[in-house]
């Protein structure tokens, strides 16, 4: 579970990290936080659920933050749990405020009123997406967009035979480069569009922001058993940073063949 500062309630629902980073990639992490605002009383979930993937993407925030530092690129995170409202879903779809996530029950979302649903959209969903819109509108140098997620290794009792998933839909420009770079790493099982297919409800954020602007984009899904400790999160971040940097640089050459390589990422 994320450690939260005592003044967490004073933080904004969404946060921009490394706003001055000038590598032309925007990272986002929609399921970064396990925070449930106090007035929702943990939504009635059990202690086991409170620590589970149902509430947030374990390790994703730490990997994304390390990537932002190493690559010197901006990162936007949601500071609200996915069970309050899922920022990677259509905000008015049933899956945006789930009553059940896999085997985990979320009693506080049962029979949610329309008024409360709308309140959560305005209070927690809109700030995240407005921040992404604002950043992209004001920083036209961004040429790639990546959402960082993690997934539970076992889903409904079935092991998922993948370590890293690269998710993409119609736009495969960035994905093709990254999959090629990752294929060289024989210690990880890397697959396209696993453990999820690019269903619109799963790729909501990248479609809303990157596809709408024709920015090359993808989602990265990391098996959360590989990123549960500080050292493993840094190792995964370093591994991904090298392949992401090279892939974004190739996208840059496609867009502007005469532009020199980006040099502001840390030496990888």
Image: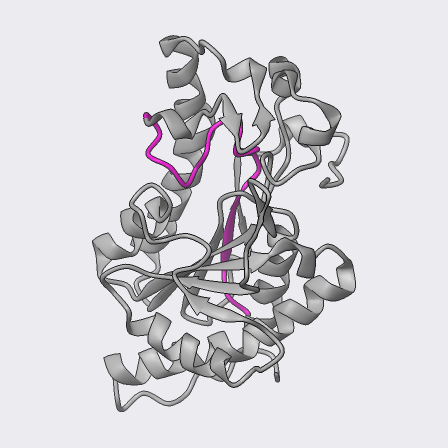
Q: Residue furthest front?
A: 158
The picture places residue 239, in percent across and down from the top left corner, at 61, 75
Q: Main secondary structure of the magenta part?
A: loop
Residue beneath the point at 37% across and 25% down:
94
* Image quadrant in which you'd find residue 251: bottom left
Q: Is 148 positioned to the left or the right of 89 in the image?
A: right
The picture places residue 42, in percent across and down from the top left corner, at 65, 20
Q: Is residue 20 above or below residue 30?
A: below
Q: Is 121 positioned to the left or the right of 267 in the image?
A: left
- The count of marks equals 0
Specify the quadrant that holds the C terminus: bottom right
**Could you say which is closer to the camera, residue 95 or residue 230?**
95
Q: Is 97 positioned to the left or the right of 4 in the image?
A: left
Report the span colored magenta: 72-92
**Could you say which is closer to the camera, residue 83 or residue 10?**
83
**Could you say which is closer to the camera, residue 167 or residue 63?**
167
Magenta stretch contains residue 154: no
Q: Is residue 185 above or below residue 156?
A: below
The picture places residue 100, in percent across and down from the top left corner, at 51, 25
Magenta stretch contains residue 85: yes
Residue beneath the point at 63% across and 78% down:
187
Specify the quadrant that holds the N terminus: top right
The picture places residue 124, in percent across and down from the top left corner, at 47, 29
The answer to whether any part of residue 152 appears in the image is no
Residue beneath the point at 34% across and 63% down:
217
The answer to whether any part of residue 224 appears in the image is yes
Q: How is the image coloured?
A: one colour
């Amino acid at each position: 579970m994320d450690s939260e500062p005592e003044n967490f309630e004073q933080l904004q629902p969404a946060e921009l990290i490394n706003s001055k980073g000038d590598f032309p990639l925007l990272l986002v992490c929609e399921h970064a936080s396990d925070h449930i605002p106090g007035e929702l009383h943990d939504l009635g979930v059990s202690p086991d659920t409170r620590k589970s993937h149902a509430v947030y993407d374990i390790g994703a925030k730490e990997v994304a933050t390390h990537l932002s530092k190493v690559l010197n690129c901006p990162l936007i995170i949601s500071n609200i749990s996915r069970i309050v409202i899922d920022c990677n879903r259509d905000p008015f779809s049933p899956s945006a405020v789930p009553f059940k996530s896999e085997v985990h029950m979320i009693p506080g979302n049962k029979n949610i009123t329309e008024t409360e649903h709308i309140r959560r959209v305005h209070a927690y969903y809109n700030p995240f997406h407005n921040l992404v819109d604002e950043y992209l509108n004001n920083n036209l140098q961004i040429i790639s967009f990546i959402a960082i997620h993690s997934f539970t290794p076992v889903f409904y009792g079935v092991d998922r035979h993948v370590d890293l998933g690269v998710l993409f839909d119609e736009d495969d420009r960035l994905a093709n480069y990254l999959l090629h770079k990752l294929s060289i790493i024989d210690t990880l099982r890397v697959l396209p569009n696993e453990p999820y297919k690019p269903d619109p409800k799963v790729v909501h954020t990248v479609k809303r922001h990157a596809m709408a602007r024709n920015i090359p984009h993808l989602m990265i899904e990391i098996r959360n058993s590989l990123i549960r400790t500080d050292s493993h999160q840094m190792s995964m971040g370093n591994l991904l940073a090298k392949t992401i940097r090279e892939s974004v640089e190739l996208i840059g050459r496609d867009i502007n063949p005469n532009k020199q390589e980006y040099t502001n990422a840390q030496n990888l």
